[in-house]
Amino acid sequence: QVQLVESGGGLVQPGGSLRLDCAASGFTFNRYWMSWYRQAPGKERELVASIFLQDSSGNYADSVKGRFTISRDNSKNTVSLQMNSLKTEDTAVYYCNAARDAMDYWGKGTLVTVSS
């Protein structure tokens, strides 16, 4: 069955960095848009970054441009999110998403807390 398993969340101080990884299985990975979403307490889930082609730079929400980098490795069925210069407002549960046509898969999420 389809599985998306996120890892790498945790507690980091403002200005710090974290890397999130998502391991995918159960579908043809290279045919799907892969994205990271996040949901902060009391807020709606929002798109953070997405990528289709392995060699592309990806698309980003304005709030994370220049700080976050999405990448994928189609040989390993993984998608990653490198997060630098983290801010307290980046605190959220981060979700991995795979989408294509009517197909839409989600991981269970990993918590990122940015706090001093």
Image (tube, rainbow, N blue to C red):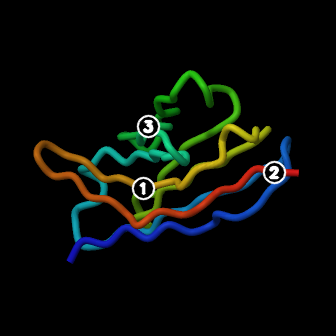
Percent position of residue 42, x then y: 50, 44
Name the residue carrying label 3. Answer: 46
- The type of residue carrying mark 3 is Glu
Whether residues under marks 2 and 3 lie with C-beta atoms below 8 angstroms apart, the answer is: no
The residue depicted at 50 percent of the width and 37 percent of the height is: 48
Residue sitting farthest toward the top: 62
Q: Earlier in the sequence, mark 2 or mark 3?
A: 3
- The type of residue carrying mark 2 is Ser
The residue depicted at 45 percent of the width and 55 percent of the height is: 95
Note whether 107 is above or below 57 in the view shown.
below
Q: Residues within 10 Å of mark 2 (few under 14, many from 20)?
A: some
How far apart marks 2 and 3 lie (CA) works out to: 21 Å
Label placed on residue 115: 2
Question: Which label lies toward us, 2 or 3?
Answer: 2
Q: Residues within 10 Å of mark 3 (few under 14, many from 20)?
A: some
The residue depicted at 19 percent of the width and 46 percent of the height is: 100
Name the residue carrying label 1. Answer: 96
Q: Earlier in the sequence, mark 1 or mark 2?
A: 1
Question: Which label lies toward us, 1 or 3?
Answer: 3
How far apart marks 1 and 2 lie (CA) works out to: 23 Å
Percent position of residue 15, x then y: 85, 41
Q: Earlier in the sequence, mark 1 or mark 3?
A: 3
Q: Is residue 7 left or right of residue 15?
A: left
- The type of residue carrying mark 1 is Cys
Residue sitting farthest toward the right: 116
Percent position of residue 31, x then y: 24, 50
Res 108 quadrant in image: bottom left
Q: Nearer the viewer, residue 28 or 82?
A: 82
Q: Is residue 102 left or right of residue 110?
A: left
